[in-house]
Amino acid sequence: MTRNIVSELNLRIDPELPGRKDFRIGCIGAGFIMRDCHLVAYNDVGFTPYAITSLDRAQSEDVARQRGIAHVHDSWQELIRDPNIEILDIAAPPDQQLQIVREAVRETSHIRGILAQKPLAMNLPEAREIVELCEAAGIPLGVNSNMRYDQSMRALKSLLDQGFLGDRVLATIEMRAIPHWQDFLRRYDRVEILNMGIHHIDAFRYLFGDPAKVTAITRSDPRTDFRHIDGISQYTFRYDDDFLASSLDDVWAWPGGETEKDIYIKWRVVGTEGLAQGTIGWPNYPAHSPSTLTFTSQKLGHGWITPGWDKVWFPDAFAGTMAQLLRAVESGTTPEISGRDNLKTLACVEACYRSIAEERTVPLAEITDEMLA
């Protein structure tokens, strides 16, 4: 059985938008992720990018012309001081976000919310400082964990919440990709888990909650010519109910030369009364390739059910990450993907690295008790 039943089953793939869309957004960064994801998604839903800045004034001006942004600033410091900016949208490398937030929280008279990239910082202590600075200033902090707004992840979350799969048994993600590592990462030895695997780690937390224990192994990526701990990575989360969630992140997905590429991200969740599986469309970017989901459930009879949608992870999911911050600012509540919540994602990342270094399974409480108490 194949049919489009998004509305019938209320799979809720679209983000809830704020009532007010004219919050003036100041954008720090003019690279790909801002130009082709943030700003495209914002324009599609009617948000209001007001000003932009980056390290290259000419690039900022070019992006401003492309995306209809009226104001260009010479530096992020100048943009932060602009009294017309209400929302700060940071698309800078994680090793630079702390210094930006330190400056931003001093401008509490006009900055009403901050959206930061993931990873929030290069390590958990710095991330905690960012969170505490925003909390002390009374500025809501959201994190751009945009895989939570991938359409297949939203639909899967709805299936789980409605009990169509029964009791959870096993979840897996398999990624075959060839990333282009950002140049700033050459200064660090944490690569794949912190910068790509974090999508899967945060998705596991979004879908299933916090694990009890984490086990990880890794090897270097033969393609990556700078020193690094984690190239090809495998990590497994174990929960108190015996549920397992495991991801294999293979960035050595193509040996090169005349061999064929086979690039994809697949996921699968099995429960006692059904299973769901699908793909993430991102590896096909810039082709318009929606993520997919197909599932079967004893509660719905025999056969496979395959919902469909036209939206894609990149760029459409980025409307969701900004929307959840704007809703929080509008209502005086905590963002759905708050900085405080994101510390638990980074604690899972830290547990992976400790597991790799010490060759053992790491209780998550061991990390949270040490670093978040």
Image (cartoon, grey):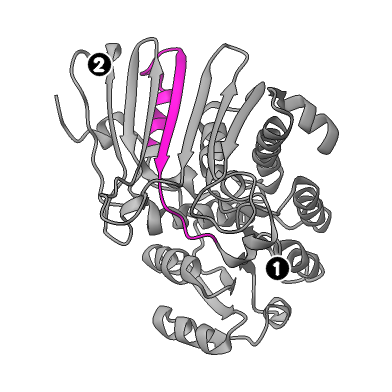
- Which quadrant is the C terminus positioned in? top right
The numbered dot on residue 300 is 2
Amino acid type shown at disc 1: Ile
Of residues 100 and 122, the one nearer the viewer is 122
Q: Residues within 10 Å of mark 2 (few under 14, many from 20)?
A: few
Horizontal side of residue 95 vs 236, given as left or right: right
Residue 231 image offset from top left, x and y in percent = 55, 45
Q: Report x, y in % for residue 183.
A: 59, 66
Task: Kindly identify the residue that appears in the image at 67 percent across and 40 percent down.
Answer: 341
Location of the N terminus by quadrant is top left
Considering every residue shown, the one lying at the far front of the view is: 257
Position above or below: 267 against 263 = above
Asked if residue 165 is among those painted magenta in the image, a careful observer would answer yes
Residue shown at 76%/46% (left/top)?
A: 124
Give left or right: position of 243 versus 289.
right
Q: Residue at x 44, y 27 (%)?
A: 172
Residue at image coords 48%, 60%: 180
The residues colored magenta run 155-181
Say which quarter of the image contains residue 279. Answer: top left
Q: CA distance from mark 1 to mark 2?
A: 48 Å
Q: Does the magenta segment cover residue 291?
A: no
Q: Position of residue 199 (x, y in %)?
A: 52, 44
